[in-house]
Amino acid sequence: MILKIKNIIKFSAGDLETITEIPTGNWLLKVNDNTGEYYLEKQPAFTLPEKVYGDVYKNVDRYLRTFSRRDKNLGILLKGLKGTGKSLTAKCLCMASDLPVILITEPFSGPAFQSFLSNITQECIIFIDEFEKTFQTDDYRDSQSSLLSIFDGVFQGKKLFLLTANNTHTINNALLNRPGRIHYLREYEGLPQDVIREVGADLLDDKTQLEDLLQVFQVVGEVNMDMVISLITEMNMYKENAREAITHLNITPGQSSYEVIWNETKKDNLGIEREYTFYTEVHYHPLAARKLSFYGYTKDGFKSSNSGQIDLEKMNITSDNDGKIFLKHKEGHISYEFIPAKPYKFVF
């Protein structure tokens, strides 16, 4: 029997309002510290931005389609960088499911907890946002293990377990590489260029700055939505391009040390023009300043006459999957290749 007292739902007997199912909506799982009794408390509905970018709904449709075709529980783990779509996908999934959503925000465990969830025999979503933080206890493996029997579906009812995490370092190994428990694992490593392009096309006042915006984020590394919106807002407000605006913002590229290589034509000691390859090392990201200054040397110590005064406004900036950054003068004068420097290794 399910009892409903205003916005509270319990499983016990008594002369109270009874319902046959948990209504659709968000319900926070709580426990009475005095009695140890678990209950559900109604929560506000999720809200979504005016426009959802990327393949969020495509993934949501896949997850719900799979859940509808299975006769057992379905586990989904959305993992990765903050602000890249994990929570948004989770909210869209919950709202599109038309199912009751049980929110777990505390590291519950034990027989009473398992018994409460097992009493829910209707289809529902068990949503644990930032799973590795919620269950970040000294014995997190034991506390997470209490969910394994529920994931495995040994109790009545079919449930969709929806977990988000920033990393998997403190997630029980029994949950990983086990599609029977966690069927879907989606990793969010940063916003793809097509999503950044779509956001920029919608929000940039000066659409001619779109390519510059894409070039900047191409070399920044992992990008989240907060970074994109903040940079576009700064560009719109101060009528600046992306390279100017980003120098004022709290956006720090992950890599900051590079070996720089470029070719340059110089006269040798005999006055004959030759092409030399010059090298140097810088300890900042190319986007950290509007102009870059450095001297380069050949392998045999021949010094460049070019001080490396690079005006970023005159350079096209691209990168590759290995983290290399390429600066090429728009008029084709010279090209620089920035190769990420390997981190120092300390030997004890």
Image (tube, grey):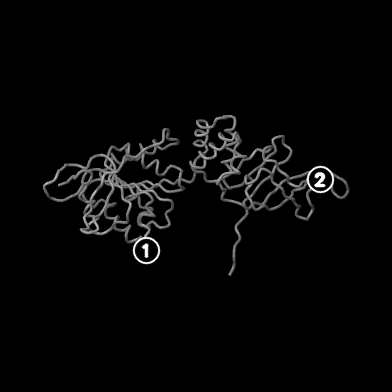
Quarter of the figure with residue 55: top left
Near mark 2 (Cα within 10 A), the count class, few <14, some 14-19 or many ≥20, is: some
Q: Give, as a three-letter code, the residue at label 1.
A: Asp
At 43% across and 51% down in the image, what residue appears? 166
Q: Is residue 96 above or below residue 179?
A: above
At 37% across and 42% down in the image, what residue appears? 90
At 41% across and 44% down in the image, what residue appears? 86
**Comparing marks 1 and 2, which lies closer to the viewer?**
1
Mark 1 = which residue? 138
Residue at the left extreme of this rendering: 15
Secondary structure type for disc 1: loop
* Circle on res. 252: none
Between residues 250 and 253, which one lies in front from this camera angle?
A: 250
Task: Name which of mark 1 and mark 2 comes first in the sequence.
Answer: 1
Query: In 3D space, how far apart are the residues under numbered discs 1 and 2 (Cα atoms)?
Result: 64 Å
Between residues 249 and 333, which one lies in front from this camera angle?
A: 249
Count of numbered circles in the view: 2
Please indicate whether residue 222 sits to the left or right of residue 40 in the image: right
Q: In the rendered structure, are the residues bearing label 1 and label 2 in contact, judged by CB atoms less than 8 Å apart?
A: no
Secondary structure type for disc 2: strand
Between residues 105 and 44, which one lies in front from this camera angle?
A: 44
Near mark 1 (Cα within 10 A), the count class, few <14, some 14-19 or many ≥20, is: few
Residue at the right extreme of this rendering: 270
At 51% across and 35% down in the image, what residue appears? 194
Please indicate whether residue 44 sits to the left or right of residue 275 in the image: left
Picture coordinates of residue 209 (x, y %)? Answer: 59, 32
Picture coordinates of residue 247 (x, y %)? Answer: 61, 44
Picture coordinates of residue 156 (x, y %)? Answer: 21, 49
Mark 2 = which residue? 266
Q: Give, as a three-letter code, the residue at label 2.
A: Lys
Quadrant holding the C terminus = bottom right
